[in-house]
Image: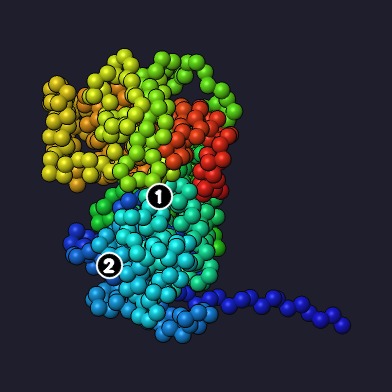
Amino acid sequence: MTTPMTAPEQAPTPTPLLAVRDLRVASASGIIVAGLDLTVAPGETVAIVGESGSGKSMTVKALTGLLPEGVHAGGRMELPTRTDASDGRKGRPGREIDLAAPGAVWRDVRGSRIALLLQDPFTSLSPVHRCGDQIGWAISEGRAERVARLLAEVGLPAEVADKYPFQLSGGMRQRVAIAAGLAADPDLLIADEPTTALDVTTQHEVLELIARLQRERDMGLILITHDLRLARSRADRIMVMYAGRLVEEGPTARVMDAPAHPYTARLAACDPPLTHRLAVLPTIPGSVPRPWSVDAECAFAARCAFAVDACRTAEPELAEVAEGHRAACLRPETAGLPVASPEGAGDLAPGTGSVGGGSAEGGSAGGSASPLLTVEGQGVSASPLLTAEGLAKRFPGSAVPALDGVDLEIAAGETVAVVGESGSGKTTLARCVVGLERPDSGRIVFHGAATGARRVQIVFQDPYSALNPGLTIGTSLSEALRAAGRPKSEVGELLELVGLPAAYARRRPRALSGGERQRVAIARALAPRAGLLVCDESVSALDVSVQAQVLNLLADLRRRLGLTLLFITHDLAVARQIADRVYVMHHGRVVETGPVDSVLGAPAHEYTQRLLASIPAAD
C-alpha cells in the first residue's frame, strides 16, 4: 500500500510590522496622496519610487505624523503586536492609529515603533548638540554605555559621541543619524533618500550598514528613492507612485523586468547605463502634474505615447497582471513597447535602456585616444583650451591637502569629467578653475578665446540656492546680460536656447520645477557667451528623467555653441554619458585619467575599480 503524498506545510505568513489602509494626504490646494495601501513584513524592504511631486515624501511624513502645517492625512495605520522578535521589542502591544490623529498621539510611535532617516543628516541632527547627546535622547538608563554600543553598531568609534555634526564627514553624520534612529529599538525604519547626497562608495557603505542592521534586528525598511538602480539592488518589493497615486506595485524583479505601467517602463529607461554611451538619453516629455489637477483620468495620460480616449475619461484602478503584481493601466501591454526617443535618435526599448536597437555611441572599452576627438560628427580641437599644472591647495585645519599637484588639460569643444568621492578634491579643482578659490601653488592657463573671467562660468548643484528667490527669471538673466555688455532684450533668446518658453521670464524660481530652475542657471551661465562651462554636480539632485533632459540639453548646447565642459560628478554612469575623457581623483591627487571608455570600461587603478564595484547592479 502506497502512502499518499501530502503537500509540504507552508510557513505561516508573518504578521506585518505595518499595515496602512486608504492613506490620503491633502492640503488647501487639493489632494496630494490618493488612497494608498501599504504593508511591510519583518525583515522586508519595500521601495517607493517616482519623480519629485509623486507623493513619496508626503506618504512617509503621514506615517510619522510629521506633515507640514496646513497638510492633513486620513486613513488607518495598524502596528500589530510583535510576537516573533527575540529582542526587547517582543510583546509590544499592537496599536491602530487614525492617520488624522493630533501630534500627541505620535509621540509613542516615532522612535519606538517607526524611525525616520532623512536624506540630509544636517536636517535631522542638531548642529549645536554633541552627537552622543542626540543619540542618547531616547535612552532612559545606562545612557553612556548604550550610546557607545550604538556607535559601535554603526561602525563609529566611541569618541564620536563628543563631536558635533559639523566635525564629521557626510557618511559619518548619516551613521550618527542611524544610531539615533535605532536608540529606541524601532520595528520599522523609513529611509527617505538616505544616500542621495553621498558619493558612490559612501552610499554603498551606508546601504550595507542598513541592510546588516535590518537583518540583525529583523526590522522592516521603507526605502524612498528616485534611483531605480538602487531600488532594484535593495528592495524585495517596489511601489511606483505618480502624481499622488500608486500606479504599480509588486516583487522587484517582476516590476523591473516586466513593467506593466508605461510610466515605470519609461522611468527605468531614463536611468543612464554605465556600460556604454547613448547618442541621446531617453527622457519622459513634460513633467509630473500637480496631484490635485488630475481629475477623472489617468494621471500619466498627458505624457504617455500610448494613451487613448478611454485613458482620459476615467482613472484606472489597480488590477492584478500577475501574482502579486498590480498596475493601474488600461493598456498594460503597451509598457514594453518601443517608443520613439527624442530628437530622432531612434526607437527606445524601455526595458533595455538602449537607443536604435542597442547601438551605442563611443568606442570599445580598450580603445585609445585619437589626436582629433570627434563629437556628433564635429571636430574638437586638439589644442588645449585650458591647462592646469601642479595645482596645490590646503585649507586651514585640514590634515590632508585638497589638491596635491593636480595637472589638468581640456581641449576646445571637449567634455572632461572629474570623478571621485566626497573630499577627493574635485570641487576645489572646479572652484580654482573658475576663480572662486586661489591655489597655493601651480598655475592655470587659458588659451585663445577663453581669456577673461567671463569666458568661464559655473553651474552649481542646487539651482534654487544659486538663483535669487525674490527676482523674476527675466531680472536675473537681464543682470547677467548687462554684466556681459549684452542687451536685456536677449532674455527670451536665452530662455529658448535652454528649452524654456520666453514667458518664463515673468516667473520667480519657486514657480519652476527643479529641472526648469537648472535650465535657467545654465542660461545665466551662457549669458556672457562663456566658452568653458564648469558643471559642479549640476544634475545630482535631479530625478533620473529630468537628469536625462538636462544632460541632453548640455550635449545639444555643446554641439550648437561649440561649448567646452568641465563636468564634476560622483555618478560614473553620468560621466560615461557626457564625457570624452575622465580624471579620477582621490585624496587631492589624480590617480587615473584617459578616454572615458577606457577608464570606466577597463580601469587600471584599484581606486577606480573600487568606485565601479560600489555601484548597484542594473540587473
Dot 1 falls on a residue whose secondary structure is loop
Q: Residue at x 31, y 14 (%)?
A: 448
Dot 2 falls on a residue whose secondary structure is loop
Classed neighbour count for the residue bearing mark 2: other residues with Cα under 10 Å, few (<14), some (14–19), many (≥20): some
Looking at the rendered image, the disc whose residue lies closer to the viewer, 1 or 2, is 1
Which one is nearer the viewer's eye here, 158 or 516?
A: 158
Name the quadrant containing residue 194: bottom left
Three-letter code for the amino acid on which mark 2 is drawn: Leu
User: Residue 316, can we see it?
Assistant: no
Give the side of residue 389 with respect to residue 289, left or right.
right
In this rendering, is residue 459 above or below 186?
above
Q: Residue tagged by mark 2?
A: 66
Classed neighbour count for the residue bearing mark 1: other residues with Cα under 10 Å, few (<14), some (14–19), many (≥20): many
Q: Residue at x 30, y 53 (%)?
A: 53
Residue 503, how many percent across, how many down? 17, 35
Q: Residue at x 35, y 68 (%)?
A: 132
Three-letter code for the amino acid on which mark 1 is drawn: Leu
Upstream in the sequence, badge 1 or badge 2? 2
